[in-house]
Amino acid sequence: MKAVVELQGIESSYIESSYGDFFYAIAQLYKPQRIVELGTFMGYSALHMAAAFRDCPDSKTHLSLVDLWDNYPFRHCSLETTRENFKKNKLHNLKNCEISFLNKSAYDVADSFDNGSVDLLHVDISNDGQSQEKTISLWHDKIREGGILLMEGGSPERDKISWMVEYNKTPIADFLNSSWFKAQYEFVILCPYPSLTFARRIK
Ligand SMILES: C[S@@+](CC[C@H](N)C(=O)[O-])C[C@H]1O[C@@H](n2cnc3c(N)ncnc32)[C@H](O)[C@@H]1O
């Protein structure tokens, strides 16, 4: 299975291990009716999930894309760039995949979603263990029981990348190994760089 997405000019750490095909497959398999992505950047992961619905016209979803875009002080792009990438791929106005672009902090928008309303949450806001704990503590109740949580990172290699070490960031492994996370989620870690934690809410 290979997703057809035009990636000219699109940057993402996921590209080198072709994680787009994974996002495409998960969206096709689970057909989540409400997807929320925290950290969209140029749209690589989101484009692949939208493409899954383009190719499954009988399924329907709402894709909420949350990013700070130009308000993020580190590596970012403009919201216009992300919108253009959807247009280039003719994924911007699919009848069965409505898209909302929320130019806000992941920490400020959780309250706009009802508890148990999210079928798939993807967290990719330049994660470290502390930011993941903060994010999931805000978003956990929004994910329905049995819902999917995808989080960038999780491998030992990803915990040792230069900015994690230089800025003394809490390893993502610390959060994944916490008794709270283990009680709420079953999960596997896909290790090809940058790695991806694939979890299912069990409680
Ligand atoms: C690694 S990129 C996301 C990559 C994207 N998912 C992909 O597939 O290529 C991280 C993004 O998170 C955004 N970001 C960082 N902190 C954020 C926050 N607190 N709320 C919302 N977005 C945030 C940045 O603006 C940046 O675009």
Image: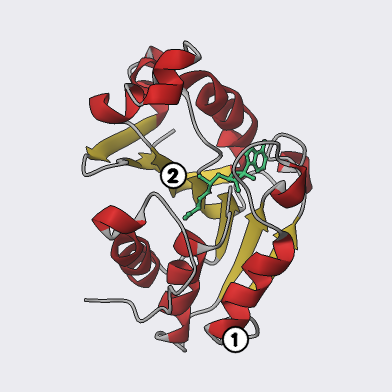
Mark 1 element type: loop
Could you tell me which quadrant the N terminus lies in? bottom left
Q: Earlier in the sequence, mark 2 or mark 1?
A: 1
Question: Could you tell me if residue 164 is visible in this image?
Answer: yes
How many circles with numbers are drawn on the protein?
A: 2
Height in image: 75 above or below 93? above
Could you tell me which quadrant the C terminus lies in? top left
In-front residue for pair 60/38: 38
Q: In the figure, is residue 15 to the left or right of 34?
A: left
Q: Amino acid at mark 2?
A: Leu
Residue in view at x 25 percent, y 54 percent: 17
Q: Residues within 10 Å of mark 2 (few under 14, many from 20)?
A: many
What is the x, y in percent for residue 173?
Answer: 33, 20
Residue under circle 2?
149
Q: In the figure, is residue 169 to the left or right of 64?
A: left
Look at the numbered discs 2 and 1 and tell me whether their residues touch, using CB distance below 8 Å.
no
Q: CA distance from mark 2 to mark 1?
A: 24 Å
When asked about the image quadrant of residue 36, the answer is bottom right
Residue in view at x 48 percent, y 25 percent: 128
Residue under circle 1?
94
Q: Amino acid at mark 1?
A: Leu
Question: Could you tell me if residue 97 is visible in this image?
Answer: no
